[in-house]
Each structure stands twice: as C-alpha cells, then as structure tokens.
Amino acid sequence: MVRNNLLDNAPIGVFDSGLGGLTVLNSLQKKLPGESFLYFGDTAHVPYGTRSRETVIRYSTEITRFLVEKRVKLIVIACNTASAIALESLQAMFPVPIIGVVEPIVEKAMMDYQSGAVGIIGTRATISSKAYYHAFKKRSSTLEIVEKACPLFVPIIEEGWGDTPVAQQVAEIYLSAFEGIQLDSLVLGCTHYPMISGTLSRILPKSVRLLSSGEAVAEHVETFLDDHDLRGSGNHVYENYFVTDFPQQFDSIGSRFLERDLPNIEQVNIFS
C-alpha cells in the first residue's frame, strides 16, 4: 500500500458540546503521541443533554463541516449525547470517518464482562436515546441493564466540586437507583463523569468496574488508524482548540481536565 503522507499527518478532529470531551482528548493524546488534534467545544450551546434531537443534529452537522474544512483525517464525537443522536446522520453526510463514544465503550464492557447487570449513567438526552441500551442488547439480549440520568453531575464538575460533600450527597441519591442490583460495571455515559469517578467509587461496591469513554475510544481509534495505515509520522505535532463562547473560562476549567494549560484557543462563530 502506498502511504498518503499528507493524509497521515492530517489532524484528528474531536468535538464535544463543551469541556467534557477533553477527557477523551487526554486519552487520545496519551495513546497517540504522534498525532495532531483539533478540538472543538461548542461552549455557546452547552449542554447538549437538554437539547432536542433536531437541534443536536444541526449543531453537530455544522461542527463536523467546520472540521472537515480543516482537512481532518478522522473525527471523534467526544460527546455521548451527540454520539447517541447524531452519529448515523453525520456518517451519511460526510466522507471522513466518524467515530462515536458509544460503541467503543460497549465493546470494552462486554469484552471484560463477568456476571451481573450493567449500569449506565448519563445526561437525560443520552439515557432517553437508549443508545447504550440498544448497543448492549445487540450483543446480549438477556443482559440486565439499569439506566439513570444524572443531570446535576455536569454543573457540579464544572464548578470544581467533583470531590466534595455536595458531590457525595448528589451521587448517593442518583446511585440509589442501583441498590439491590448486582452490578458488574457502571458505564460513565458522559465525558465529564471521569472527573467524579473517585466519588462514585467510594459509594459503589469495590467489585463494580467504572467504564469511561476515553480509554475505550483511544484504543478504538488506534486500531482504526493502524488498520487503514493512517498513523501520523510524529513530525510537527500540534493541537488547536476552537470554542464558540468564553475562551477564558474554557482555558481555566479545561486545564483541570487535561492537568495542563491549553494552547492555541480560538473563539469562532460557525452557526448562522
């Protein structure tokens, strides 16, 4: 196979409704240090979890078009809501490969599954979409699945309260939905939720595995790049960040997610 060096060294696009997708980006950068990345956070319209299906598809389409025009070689939808609602529409509209967060994490969950039920927590829109439910049932029709929407986690995390008594109390209320259920694993169906995993682990039995999108997506993307001979050369690696509102706030909160300063942040207006 003749390698397309221009395409190999093209960046990978990653988008989210705001900051949560930075947890996925962090995993991608650790797994794929030879790749460049463009991250798009739609901070003007966050959260997508409370938006209608039509609105999520419309926002996701405009962001994808923006990234395609930047000549990315692959797009990762680092947003559970957009992955659950818009993935198939985007794949049908655009020629660039597009990967969501749902399938990779379900594949990882089933690969290491032992016994018991699978719990899923996420935004109202993600839970209402039943995307995780159907993805699990496609693999095992008899698997017990318990879902719970946890809308307060995102604002708690963005306030920096993920490891406080406030978070503990809210988490105890939400996780009471799983009392009396023998859980094998709990899927963190929102990319913000890894930031609260310590609090969740203190409440849940030690046997319950917490599964987040970042590592699963990074492994999936690595395999895709290898299978299609698209690995970057590692030369002139860069990262750029695009937001639709408040770049200063994005920098201050986002630096907590990546545990470092964010370079090259640009505010853009792509919505008509």
Image (spheres, rainbow, N blue to C red):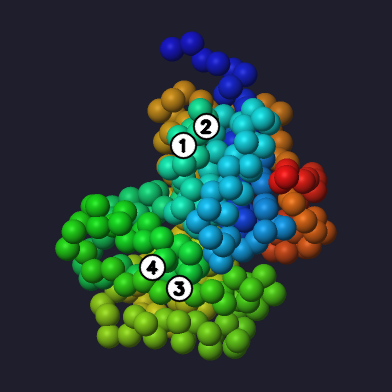
Return the residue at label 2.
Answer: 94
Query: Disc 2 on helix, strand or loop?
Result: loop
Residue kind at label 1, given as amino acid type: Gln
Q: Does 63 sit left or right of 118 as displayed?
A: right
The CA distance from mark 4 to mark 2 is 30 Å
Question: Type of residue at label 3?
Answer: Ala
| Pointer 1 or 3: first along the chain | 1
Which label's residue is closer to the chain start, 3 or 2? 2
Q: Is residue 166 above or below residue 88?
A: below
- Residue 66: percent from left, percent from top: 67, 37
- Residue at label 3? 149
Task: Count all numbered tags in the image, as a single digit.
Answer: 4
Task: Confirm or deny contact between disc 3 and disc 2 (CB under 8 A).
Answer: no
Where disc 4 sits, the SS reads strand
Q: Which residue is mark 4?
A: 120
Mark closer to the chain start, 4 or 2: 2
**Amino acid type at mark 2:** Phe
In the picture of the structure, the residue carrying the numbered disc 1 is: 91
